[in-house]
Image: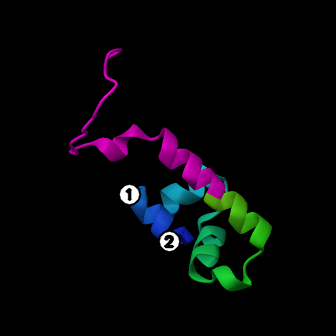
Amino acid sequence: MNLKELRKNCNLTQQTAAEIVGVSLRTYVSYENDEMSADQLKLERICQKLSEYASNNTSILNNKVLLITGGTGSF
């Protein structure tokens, strides 16, 4: 998954994504638009931070139906 897809899956603007990963908007946009010429280590770190944000962000579940099957004895 590329950086743009990852950001859109989290329902983030470029500005918000840049703030989350701790880079300027200009830097973030350049990484998102041209991943092939970007510093691969920095790009990897940006993707990692957005992935961590997505896994910790429960707002992506808003207006969604969650189906839990089996093993619900502790709920």
Residue 42 drawn at (x, y percent): 75, 65
Q: Residue at x 35, y 47 (%)?
A: 60
Total tally of numbered discs in the picture: 2
The front one of 74 and 10 is: 74
The CA distance from mark 1 to mark 2 is: 11 Å
**Relative to 68, 58 lies left or right:** right
Reply above or below: 31 against 20. Answer: below
Residue furthest top as drawn = 74
Q: Secondary structure at mark 2?
A: helix
**Relative to 9, 2 lies left or right:** right
Q: Residues within 10 Å of mark 1 (few under 14, many from 20)?
A: some
**Relative to 22, 73 lies left or right:** left
Q: Which residue is mark 2?
A: 4
Reply above or below: 22 against 37. Answer: above
Residue 54 drawn at (x, y percent): 49, 48
Q: Amino acid at mark 1?
A: Asn
Q: How is the image coloured?
A: rainbow
Q: Residue at x 76, y 72 (%)?
A: 40
Quarter of the picture containing the C terminus is top left
Residue 57 drawn at (x, y percent): 45, 41
Q: Which residue is mark 1?
A: 11
Residue 64 falls within the magenta-colored stretch: yes
Magenta stretch bounds: 48-75
Reply above or below: 25 against 63. Answer: below
Q: Amino acid at mark 2?
A: Lys
Quarter-of-image position of residue 69:
top left
Q: Residue at x 32, y 16 (%)?
A: 73
